[in-house]
Structures are given as C-alpha cells and as structure tokens.
Image: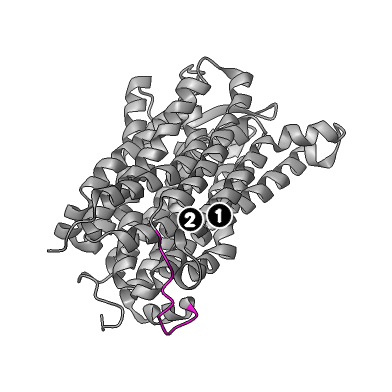
Amino acid sequence: MAEHTAWSLRGRLMGMMFLQYFVQGSYLPIISVYLEEALGFSARGLGYFAAALSLGPLVSALVLGQLADRHVRLERLLAVVHLGAGLTMLLLAFQRPLLSSFLPPDAWLLTPSGQLGLVVLLGLIYSVLYTPTMMLTNALAFHHLRVQEREFPVVRMWGTIGFIVPAWLIESVLLAGKQGLELNQARGVALVVSGLSGLVMAAYCWSLLPPTPPRREQRRPFAPAALIPLFRRRDFLVLVVVSFGIAMVHQFYFTLNSPYLKAILRQAGVGEAWEGRISSVGQIAEIFVMLIMATLVARLGFKGTMSLGALAYLLRYVIFAVAAAVPWSFGAVMTLVVLGQALHGLCFGCFLAAAFMYIDRVAPPDVRSTAQSFYGTIVLSLGFALGGTVAGAVGDWFTAASVQELPRALGGLANQAGVFRMMLDGQVLYRDWVGIWLAGALLAGVCLVGFVLGFPKRQPSPSNCDH
C-alpha cells in the first residue's frame, strides 16, 4: 500500500484549493442577478457574459499546460496568472465609476449596449487568465499526492468549502439589511472580494506551494501532440463528447439559477439577498460527496459514478420545474428548491470531479497537465460557452411582454403555471421557468443516455495499453 502524503504538504494543497475556489465563489453565485438587476442585462446578455467566461481557455489552456509540462515551475505560473486575473476582476468591479469619472453621460460605453460589450470583454480577459488555473491546480495536486484516489477528493473538498464561505460572508455581512435598488447596486462588492482574494491567491502560490518543476527529461517536446493517441480510446472519446453536453447542462444552472432564486424569493415577498446562501447548499452537499468519492468509484466504477452524476443533472432541472409550477406554500416550494440545489453535489462530484480523476489515470505522466487543460478546455470552455449562449437564448425565448406571447410548452402547461412577473430595465416582463428548466432537463437526458450506452464498463487502463 502506498505511503500517504505528509500532512504538512496536504495542508498546503488544501489551502490552495480553498483560495482557488474562494475567488470564484465570491462572484459566480450572484453575478447573474447583479448583471440583470443592476446593469439591466437581458437573459441573452447573461448568456453572452457566461459564454465570455468560458471562451478564454481556448486561447490559454493548452499554452499554459505546455508551459507547466515543459518550461515553467507550475506554482510560479499559477502565481503570475492569478495576479493578472485578480487585477482584471477589480477592473470589472470598478469599470462603471471609472468610466463615469472622465466620460460624458451620453458616451457609448455608458449605454446599455456599450456597457454589455465592455463587461463581456473584461469577462473574456478574466477567463483567459483564471479558468485554466482550475485544471492546473488539479494537476499540481495530482503531482504531489501519493494516494491520489483517496487523497484528492479530500483536498478538492477544501475548494468546495472555499466556494461556500464567500456567499455567506458577502450576503450576511456586506449586504446585510440592504434591499431594492440599494441591494442591486451593492452586489458589485462581490467582484471586489473576488479580485482581492485573487491577489492573495497569487501571493500564496508564489510563497507557499511546493516546487513543481516541468518534466524536461521527456522526449516529446510538444505536449499537446501526445494527446492524439488518447482519442483512439473509446472511453476517452465518449467522455469528451458527453462532457461537452454535460458542460452545456451545467451552464444552464450557473447562468439562470440566481435569477430563478430571485424570482421565487420575490414572489414570496423576500427582498433581502439570499440567492448566494441558498445556492451554497449545493456546495455543502458537494463536500459530503467528495468525502465518499473514493468509495463510490471503488464500488460503482467510473461508469457507474459518472452515470449517477448525469442522472442528478436531469433530476435537478425537473425538480426546479416542479417547484416553479406547483401552487404550494412558500415553505414547500423552497424545500423542493433546496433539494434541487443539493443535487449539485452529485452533479459536480460524481461527473466532473470523477472525470478529472479518470483523465489523470489514463493520461501519460509527462502530459497530465496538458491533458487536464485539454479536458478542461472542452468542458469549461467550448461546452460552457455554448451552454451559456443556449441558456441565454432559452431564457429570452421563455420571456415575453405578456403571458399570451410565451411559447406553449407541454401543450400549454407552462402558460398556466411557473410564469413569474419581473421588471427589467423599467419594463414589465413575464418569464416561464417551467419551460426553461425542462429544456435543460431534456439536454441532460440526452447526455445520460449517450454516456450509459457509449462508455465502457471496465476500469481504465494506462493510455499505452489497449482498452
């Protein structure tokens, strides 16, 4: 039996994961509500921003993976990239007051379209820098952990804790007591917290992470080229294709969940900020899933574990649709909503986290950073970008100036239940949340069937062996 990693090293890796996801947890759960309520973005605008946050790794993921595998110490690379990402997030937080200080009130950049364009551009720059670091921190952890399948889930669990903490800090402390227009504008503090924590993460990577040098002794100088043989494996090819669809399903949640929660709370007369804390239930559940991940993989295999994750995506959106449609009490509806949030633990842990573990097992040792970055590019870039665009388009399709103009989903059911009144940039609109979530559930069902039918059942073998 392999010797366990020293506690001091595991502690530093846990701290790395905590800060890595504290940065993201500061803004991601409520950014859609902030953009919609404070800046007047439509659902399609939310989708464009979500796509921008996903497209960046297309530019940088494989480049950073190549640098980490061949040329630069990984902890130094993480420090530099996090420094740039933190500064970009601070610029995103303060871009509106900065522009207002030296531009005339009618300047194009201060109009709704100009504001959307600038926010999307800054989101794209931020994603170029930040998103690949999620895969690179995985690669650094895998590099130093001796018993990966048992130790990585516990280390990665601290990333989940890091994602949860800022939601409670921001809403219960920084936004406490604020309502209405004051609350909508004040939500921008989440971007400030994210930017500052990114700078802290940069210092942590530079000073406290263990040295992780590149593997210069390997013969293949261009790491991405070594990934080509992986596509001859049925398991890897099916995983990549299905993961693309799962990423789209995943992005439905992060694009539309906070506006959905806001609609539920507003209909019940709750005016204070609770969206981030409610969504954190998903990350709390994720902690428990990560703690039993090794047991799940050992008993169900990778196929069974990831199938369970795909099924959880389907069930979550069905539950959200039912919660929007049923004429129950607020307590009963919120019970369903919280149950749907909790399923995020199975969604992320059993599919995405298990997939990263699978990739690390089948990739050759000298290209694991690149393999993680490549898979992350497919999942977190192309799939998320398309998913954000589709989610925004679906959200706009199920939003109209009157109930009669909404599309008739399921023979008209969605025109009678699940429609919520909202104000967007001074205009009264109606949004059908049943139709939105059933569209996400349909896509999740396709992914589940494709994975169950296409992915082989046997455990993964090294990439240089037949499978």
Q: Residue at x 24, y 62 (%)?
A: 302
Query: Which of the pair 390/222 is nearer the observer?
Result: 222
Q: Residue at x 31, y 43 (%)?
A: 286
Q: Position of residue 230 (x, y in %)?
A: 37, 78
Label 2 and label 1: CA atoms lie apart by: 8 Å
Relative vertical location of residue 218 with respect to residue 127 in this rendering, above or below: below
Q: Is residue 456 left or right of residue 104?
A: left
Judging by the rendered image, the residue that carries numbered circle 2 is: 133
Q: From this viewpoint, is residue 12 visible?
A: yes
Q: Are marks 2 and 1 in contact (CB under 8 Å)?
A: yes
Q: Residues within 10 Å of mark 2 (few under 14, many from 20)?
A: many
Query: Which of the pair 443/74 is nearer the observer?
Result: 74
The residue positioned farthest toward the top in the image shown: 177
Q: Residues within 10 Å of mark 1 (few under 14, many from 20)?
A: many
Query: Which of the pair 310/411 is nearer the observer?
Result: 310
Q: Position of residue 64 (x, y in %)?
A: 52, 65
On the image, which quarter does residue 21 sit in? top left
- Residue 81 is labelled as 1
Query: SS at mark 1?
Result: helix
Query: SS at mark 2?
Result: helix
Q: What's the magenta bit mostly, secondary-structure-wise?
A: loop
